Image (cartoon, rainbow, N blue to C red):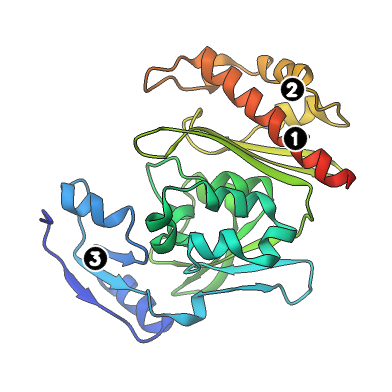
Amino acid sequence: MILTEFDYVRPAGLDEALTLLSGTRGARILAGGQSLLPDLRAGADRAALLVDIRRLEELRGVTRTPDGTGLRIGSLTTLAELAADPLVLAEAPELAAAARANGDPQVRNLGTVGGNLAAAGRATDLPVAAMAADAEVELAGPGGRSTLAAEELAAGSAPAATVLTALLVPAAGPAAAFEKTADRATRYPVCATAVRITPGGPRIAVTGATSRPLRLRGVEDRLRGGPYGTDAVLAAFRAEPRELFVPGRGTSAEYLGHLVGVLTARALQRAERALDR
């Protein structure tokens, strides 16, 4: 039973979807539905109109960007497709690992890249991988196309009445990794971390242990140039303010700060080994 009434429409193209979203108060996008439909059933969310974009093939698939320096991942690409795509595995392995860690096979076969990135109020896996990759999202709205840093999207900066059409990811090669400790019941991350090792130093993003997905620039600065041994990484995390880590689900801030340090050390060491191959 769904505890809210709404209208439903399946637009034939992206332009029609944008017109519906901008012209109907309370219109919501339906893609994978893995977050929205459970919330509608529980009465935790409401919608006046569901705009079903699942058949918009222009929003699917993984290709290289026109300049050849990165990947363009359509927002309706499923998590299962993302986890298995050869280009993603070779050039953005932290994204493939984050997709593979998400939920169970049924969730991954239905859930989409755009939905996972835009999920509000949930600690999902893809945002930290996108942030560590220094990725951008491509948005379509009444005013045309625009891009927004994945970090800004995670902070809630996306304009209203826009559709997330693609994730734009700089290629990293193998020097990236993702690690997660999941809640056994929900598979949401108690703590997840994604890293990329770049010529300018490591990029590190975390979720679950923090109030929202965050780049940890203080830790990045302390680890610039290495080493990435566990002791060095844990020391870098101990220098972060304890209030950064939000206790919950029976865990303390102290525990979460240590856990995210251990997971980050593991991810950095895996990325470093891949870089040396």
Tell me the distance, in whole angstroms, between the alpha carbons under discs 2 and 3. Answer: 48 Å
Q: Quadrant of the N terminus?
A: bottom left
Tell me the distance, in whole angstroms, between the alpha carbons under discs 1 and 2. Answer: 9 Å
What kind of residue is marked 2?
Val
Question: Callout 1: 10 Å neighbours few (<14), some, many (20+)?
Answer: many
Q: Residue at x 56, y 74 (%)?
A: 61
Q: Secondary structure at mark 3?
A: loop
Residue 133 point in image, percent of width and height: 69, 50
What kind of residue is marked 1?
Leu
Q: Would you name the residue on which mark 2 appears?
A: 233
Q: Are marks 2 and 3 in contact (CB under 8 Å)?
A: no
Sequence order check: which comes first, mark 2 or mark 3? 3
User: Can residue 203 be seen here?
Assistant: yes
Give the answer, above or below, for where 26 lies relative to 144: above
Q: Secondary structure at mark 1?
A: helix
Residue 17 point in image, percent of width and height: 36, 78
Q: Secondary structure at mark 2?
A: helix
